[in-house]
Amino acid sequence: MNIQDTHQAPLSPDDFAHLGQGAIAYVKAIKSDDVSRLFPQVSNIQPGLDLFLLLGADGVPIMLTDSKDAAVANAWEHQLQTVSLH
């Protein structure tokens, strides 16, 4: 067996979308100016604020907050492990 035989096929975009679903989340910084574009149902947010999104591994928003600590605490409360994305 050569070393190439031990590698798995690359993950598809769909595979990445479901990776860690239900167990992993990430926190993303966002400006309040972008909130209405991403979430049209949200209104009356002061422009220029630094906010944080807690998102599931598949990118589905879980919560919007003004504190990174609150986003991480909410993840832990719901037994989600937060990961860093670079």
Image: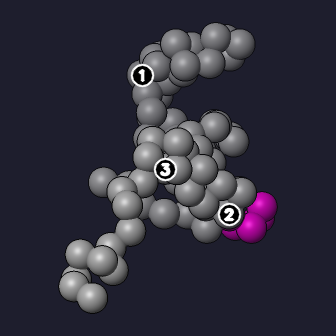
Sequence-wise, the earlier of marks 1 and 3 is 3
Q: Secondary structure at mark 1?
A: loop
In this picture, is 29 found above or below 2? above
Residue ID for mark 1: 48
Q: Residue at x 68, y 16 (%)?
A: 42
- Disc sitting over residue 16 in the figure: 3
Q: Amino acid at mark 3?
A: Phe
* Distance from the alpha carbon under mark 1 to that under mark 3: 32 Å
Which quarter of the figure has residue 29?
Answer: top left
- In magenta, the rendered stretch is 75-80
Q: Residue at x 71, y 13 (%)?
A: 41
Q: Amino acid at mark 2?
A: Ala
Between marks 1 and 3 in the image, the one whose residue lies nearer the viewer: 3
Q: Amino acid at mark 1?
A: Gly
Q: Residue at x 43, y 28 (%)?
A: 31
Q: Position of residue 33 (x, y in %)?
A: 46, 17
